[in-house]
Amino acid sequence: MKILETKAIVLSSLKYGDTSLIIRCYTQDFGLKSFIAKGVFSKKKRNTSLYFPLAEIDLSLQPKSNEQQLVFLKSAQTSHYYESLHFHPIKSAIVFFLAEILNLVLKEESDNPELYFYIEHSLKEFDQKKDDFADFHLIFLIQLSHFLGFYPNLEIDGNLFDLENGFFTNSNSSINMLKADETVLFKKLLELHFSEDSKNTFNQSQRSLLLEILVKYYQIHTNNFKKPKSLQVLHELFS
C-alpha cells in the first residue's frame, strides 16, 4: 500500500499503552486523521513536544488495512518551528483553547486546502507577534466560522444580532439575541483582522464577554459542541 505523506496540525493526543500516543490531527491533504505514534515515551524516541497542540508536522502514514481500526505512523518530523507559541504563558493558553475548539468543530475526513492554509497562516502570524495579541483568539474564531458555514450574514443591518439565525435585526424575535450593547461589540469584532500591525481593540471585560458570545454561537451551530474545558483558564487569564 502507498505511504500517505502530508503536512498536519495536531489537535489532540491521548496516551495509548505505556509508550504510544493516539494523535488526532487536521492534515493538508486528507482532512481529519487519527493515527498511532508508537514508542513516543520510550527512552530512545522520547519526543512528546512533536505532538504539542497545534504543532505543525510532516507525516508519513501507513494506510490501514481492513483489519485495522487506526492508521499507524511511519515517520513524523517538525514542519514549522514556532518561536513562542508553546512557550509564552498567555499564547500557550490560547493555543490549548483553540486546539480544543478545532477538535470539536472539525469533522470532515476530506481535504480543505483553504481551511488548512487559514489555520496555518493564522498560527504563524500569532507566533510572530511580540505584543498586542490578546484579541487573536476572538478574531480567529469569528473568521473560522467562514469555513464552517455560519459566518454572520452582513447583508442586512440592525441593532441586535440573532445568534440562532446568524443575522442582524431590529426585532427581538429569538431567545438567542444579543443585546444592543453586545451587538455593538460583536460588530466591532467583525471589522477586525489580525496582522503584524494590528493592535488590541478590547478591554478585559469586553474580551471576556465576546468569548462567551462566540462559544455560545459555536454551540448553537455545531452538533455535539461542548463548552471547552480550557475556557475558564482564558477567562482567568484575561480577568
Image (cartoon, grey):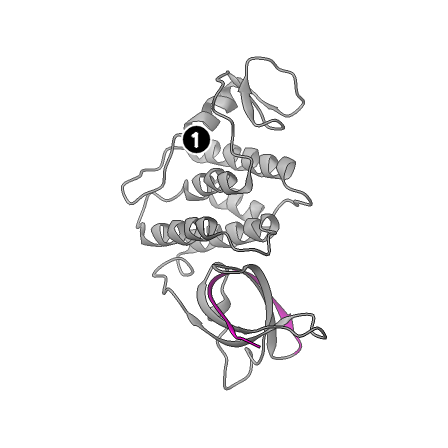
Helix or strand or loop: what does disc 1 sit on? helix
Image quarter for residue 167? top right
Which sits in the foreground, 15 or 220? Answer: 220
Circle 1 crowding by C-alpha within 10 Å: few under 14, some 14–19, many from 20: some
Magenta segment main secondary structure:
strand
* Percent coordinates x, y for residue 38 in the rendering: 58, 79
Q: Is residue 46 above or below residue 237?
A: below
Name the residue located 49 percent from the left edge and 64 percent from the top edge: 52
Which residues make up the magenta segment?
A: 1-17
- Amino acid type at mark 1: Leu
Farthest residue to the left: give it.
Answer: 197
Farthest residue to the front: give it.
Answer: 1
Name the residue located 50 percent from the left edge and 82 percent from the top edge: 45
Image quarter for residue 14? bottom right
* Percent coordinates x, y for residue 114 in the rendering: 44, 49
Asked if the stretch drawn in magenta spans residue 2, the answer is yes
Farthest residue to the top: give it.
Answer: 171
Number of numbered discs overlaid on the protein picture: 1
Check the picture and name the quadrant holding the N terminus. Answer: bottom right
Relative to 101, is 92 on the left or the right?
A: left
Q: Is residue 198 above or below residue 157?
A: below
* Percent coordinates x, y for residue 234 in the rendering: 51, 46
Q: What residue is disc 1 on?
A: 190
Which sits in the foreground, 60 or 145? Answer: 60
Farthest residue to the bottom: give it.
Answer: 44
